[in-house]
Image (cartoon, rainbow, N blue to C red):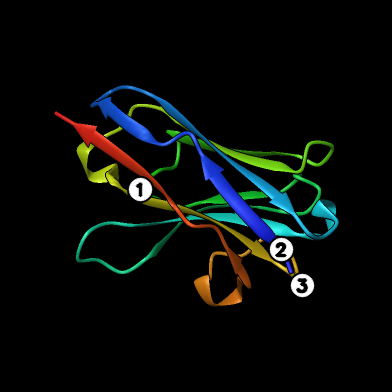
Amino acid sequence: QVQLVESGGGLVQAGGSLRLSCAASGRTFSSLAMGWFRQAPGKEREFVATISRSGGTTGYADSVKGRFTISRDNAKNTVDLQMNSLKPEDTAVYYCAARGRGGSSLSIREYNYWGQGAQVTVSL
């Protein structure tokens, strides 16, 4: 089993920045591809960003490309999401996810493990 714990959410004004962090335990972190997803009220959970096991490959949703950056530290067992130029439409609960097999993926169905989520609220 893999345990994931997010931190770093909060309230920020539009145009501001936040950094989310996810700490993993229970399995060799470098064997896990990682992703960030988000879910806004009344909407389905959607893909935000993904990173390969080595960190050499990343992928982003079009809505966050150029503003968000995913990174990982395999020595610290963490994956981060740096969010810049935040917009009110970025408001959501953000979830860290791990994929037990395979590389980075945009598909929510391919992730086996999920964190509890971190609230991000962007005000005007």
The residue positioned 29% from the left and 30% from the top of the image is: 11
Few, some or many C-alpha atoms within 10 Å of disc 3 (few <14, some 14-19, many ≥20)? few
Q: Nearer the viewer, mark 2 or mark 3?
A: 2
Q: Residue at x 39, y 63 (%)?
A: 46
Report helix, strand or loop for mark 1. loop
Q: Pick whichever of labels 2 and 3 is earlier in the sequence.
A: 2
Of residues 24 and 16, the one nearer the viewer is 24
Residue 44, given in percent of the width and then of the height, sits at 31, 69
Which residue does the numbered mark 1 point to in the structure image?
63
- Inter-mark Cα distance, 2 to 3: 13 Å
- Residue at the spot x=21%, y=38% of the render? 88
Residue at point 23%, 26% (across, down): 14
Q: Amino acid at mark 1?
A: Ser
Residue denoted by label 3: 101
Query: Do the numbered discs 1 and 3 sit on residues whose CB atoms are within 8 Å?
Result: no
In the image, residue 80 above or below residue 18: below
The numbered dot on residue 2 is 2
Label pair 2/1, CB-CB below 8 angstroms: no
Q: Position of residue 91 (x, y in %)?
A: 27, 44
Q: Is residue 110 above or below residue 116?
A: below
Instruction: Give me the C-alpha separation between circle 2 and circle 1.
Output: 29 Å
